[in-house]
Image: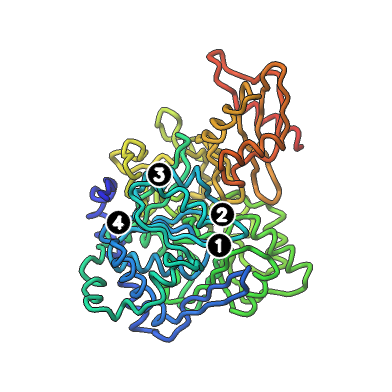
């Protein structure tokens, strides 16, 4: 694969000179952990359904990464080849990324909620050579799905199945045999190690086009975010990071997989969110930090209050993905005894803003934080003119952690010659430089931290034989932040209800989380003279109904 990460070279010299790009890779960091603390517990992976817990010291983690790396090489994976990984928060996810980095391959994390429609596009666009998936997770047969997809994906040479029973199992192909002892293994592990500006991750994000975009990151862009992030949160080697947010999201990937290694800390990863189990893990493992979306915080506070089981080691809960309700911050602070930190970020940048640990608690629900070092913000009107403090406008970001570009789509990079990236969000800045996200100019709904690609879902609704017009808009939800509502004008003489829409969307192989959870029928849509649907009027209608 040839990568067109055109946004890296223009800012390299300044980013290195200013000390923001460390010019190190995850290989350097893992090797440093093995040298400094080989027997320290690096990773604890807990699987809810099987009840198994797997632990690795840093020495064991590096050894397994080497083993899987050589196994991948024997499957024909080489420098700049894409290895797609559709796994929940299992230890294999962490190891696959580290293994890819050993041999210069590029990992493409894929959310486990994705089904045929999302996967077929991403795997084809990214030209994945290998796909690693579970046999079964939460009752769904992933092996059956991806095996059926393979004939339509000419680049996909191998499917590797975790917990499989055949010759294509992860255990048989990668983690079982001592590949690292094979002749030539050390050459495989060293000759194609990536540099700090080589693409190390392709991760897809939904955009206004309705098709996912492949975000390219390097070691420098990722670490330029993680290092100041950890410093602001005062995290170090003594911390234990709990990560229940999916590692196929940037949240889990950057702060649950990479950050603990950079800190020489310990990570606890958990695959199915169960609040009472999470409380048990925090207490048993001494977890001191976690990052997740608002529903996780709501569930944790509620279950601590009801169970009476406290979490005294949990110092900080960073909450992002949607605004945090004020009462939730107050309840969580009182019940958990934990500092609640608000933040805002994007797949393209990682966390961009977060509040300070010594900020008043109200900052967590009145702002989305202030920029990390190496990040600049400005608010402009739609003509590009900077607006006064306190006024809403388009949020532009110039950051040392800005991505390298969208794979095969440099025309969509949204970054000008001066390095300003158009986030697609609306926001305002206060006099202290704290930002508040006030809306989104791009048409995306965020449900519990998960982006719903509205344009794509609307396009599918228009295929329904009973629908004449359709729009998908957000409505507020206390737990998830937002949910999706389908506003529909039926065709003359046709009737439609929510269950029939759900069944239709399932037949289109759409992820369940993307399917609208509410339906409103109308005789006509509010529209401009040119016929464009006025979604702001639909949103106002939903807000009025919720009031």
**Does dot 4 land on a helix, a strand or a loop?**
loop
Q: Distance between the residues labelled 3 and 1?
A: 37 Å
The residue pinned by badge 4 equals 81
- Seen as rendered, the residue at the extreme top is 529
| N-terminal label among 2 and 4 | 4
Secondary structure beneath disc 1?
Answer: strand
Q: Where is residue 536 in the image (x, y as percent from the top left)?
A: 61, 28
Query: Which residue is depicted at the point 29% across and 61% down?
Result: 77
Q: How far apart are marks 1 and 2 (CA)?
A: 8 Å
Answer with left or right where residue 73 lies relative to residue 349. Answer: left
Q: Are marks 3 and 1 in contact (CB under 8 Å)?
A: no
**Which numbered marker is on residue 3?**
none
Q: Do the residues labelled 1 and 2 touch (CB within 8 Å)?
A: yes
Is residue 231 shown to the viewer in this render?
Answer: no
Of mark 3 and mark 1, the one earlier in the sequence is 3
- Label 3 Cα crowd, 10 Å radius (few <14 / some 14-19 / many 20+): few
Badge number at residue 320: 2
Q: Label 3 belongs to which residue?
A: 152
Q: Mark 1 points at which residue?
A: 291
Camera-nearest residue between 67 and 315: 67
Q: How far apart are the two marked residues, 3 and 2, measured between alpha carbons? A: 37 Å
Out of 140 and 397, give the one closest to the viewer.
140
- Label 2 sits on a secondary structure element that is loop
Residue at horizontal 29 percent and vertical 81 percent from the top: 181
């Amino acid at each position: 694969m040839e990568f067109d990460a055109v946004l890296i070279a223009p800012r390299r010299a300044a980013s290195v000179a200013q000390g923001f790009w460390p010019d190190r890779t995850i290989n350097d960091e893992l090797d440093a952990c093995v040298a400094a603390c080989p027997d320290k517990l690096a990773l604890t992976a807990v699987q809810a359904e099987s009840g198994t817990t797997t632990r690795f010291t840093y020495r064991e983690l590096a050894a397994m990464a080497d083993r899987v790396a050589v196994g991948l090489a024997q499957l024909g994976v080489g420098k700049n080849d894409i290895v797609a990984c559709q796994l929940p928060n299992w230890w294999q996810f962490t190891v696959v990324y580290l293994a890819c980095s050993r041999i210069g391959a590029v990992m493409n994390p894929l959310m486990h909620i994705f089904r045929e429609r999302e996967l077929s596009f991403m795997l084809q666009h990214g030209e994945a050579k290998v796909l690693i998936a579970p046999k079964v997770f939460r009752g769904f047969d992933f092996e059956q799905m991806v095996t059926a997809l393979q004939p339509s994906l000419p680049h996909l040479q191998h499917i590797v199945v975790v917990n499989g029973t055949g010759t294509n199992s992860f255990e048989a192909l990668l983690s079982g045999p001592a590949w690292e002892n094979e002749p030539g293994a050390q050459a495989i592990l060293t000759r194609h190690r990536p540099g700090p500006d080589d693409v190390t991750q392709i991760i897809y994000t939904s955009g206004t086009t309705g098709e996912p975009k492949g975000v390219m990151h390097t070691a420098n862009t990722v670490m330029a975010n993680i290092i100041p992030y950890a410093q602001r949160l005062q995290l170090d080697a003594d911390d234990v990071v709990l990560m229940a947010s999916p590692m196929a999201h940037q949240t889990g990937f950057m702060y649950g997989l990479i950050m603990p290694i950079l800190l020489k800390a310990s990570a606890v990863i958990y695959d199915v969110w169960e609040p009472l189990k999470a409380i048990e893990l925090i207490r048993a493992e001494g977890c001191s930090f976690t990052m997740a979306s608002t529903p996780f915080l709501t569930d944790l506070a509620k279950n601590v209050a009801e169970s009476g089981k406290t979490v005294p080691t949990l110092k900080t809960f960073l909450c992002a993905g949607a605004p945090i309700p004020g009462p939730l911050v107050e309840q969580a602070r009182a019940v958990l005894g934990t500092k609640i930190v608000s933040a805002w970020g994007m797949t393209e940048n990682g966390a961009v803003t977060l509040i300070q640990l010594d900020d008043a608690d109200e900052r967590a629900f009145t702002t989305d934080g202030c920029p990390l070092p190496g990040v600049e913000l400005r608010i402009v009107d739609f003509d590009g003119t900077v607006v006064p403090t306190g006024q809403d406008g388009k949020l532009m970001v110039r950051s040392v952690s800005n991505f390298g570009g969208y794979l095969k789509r440099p025309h969509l990079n949204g970054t000008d010659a001066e390095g300003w990236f158009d986030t697609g969000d609306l926001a305002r800045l206060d006099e202290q430089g704290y930002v508040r996200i006030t809306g989104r100019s791009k048409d995306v709904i965020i449900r519990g931290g998960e982006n719903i690609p509205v344009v794509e879902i609307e396009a599918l609704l228009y295929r329904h034989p009973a629908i004449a017009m359709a729009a998908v808009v957000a409505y507020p939800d206390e737990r998830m932040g937002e949910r999706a509502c389908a506003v529909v004008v039926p065709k003359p003489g046709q009737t439609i209800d929510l269950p029939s829409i759900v069944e239709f969307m399932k037949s289109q192989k759409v992820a369940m989380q993307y399917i609208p959870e509410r339906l409103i029928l109308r005789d006509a849509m509010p529209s401009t003279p040119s016929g464009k649907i006025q979604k702001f009027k639909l949103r106002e209608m939903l807000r009025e109904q919720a009031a």
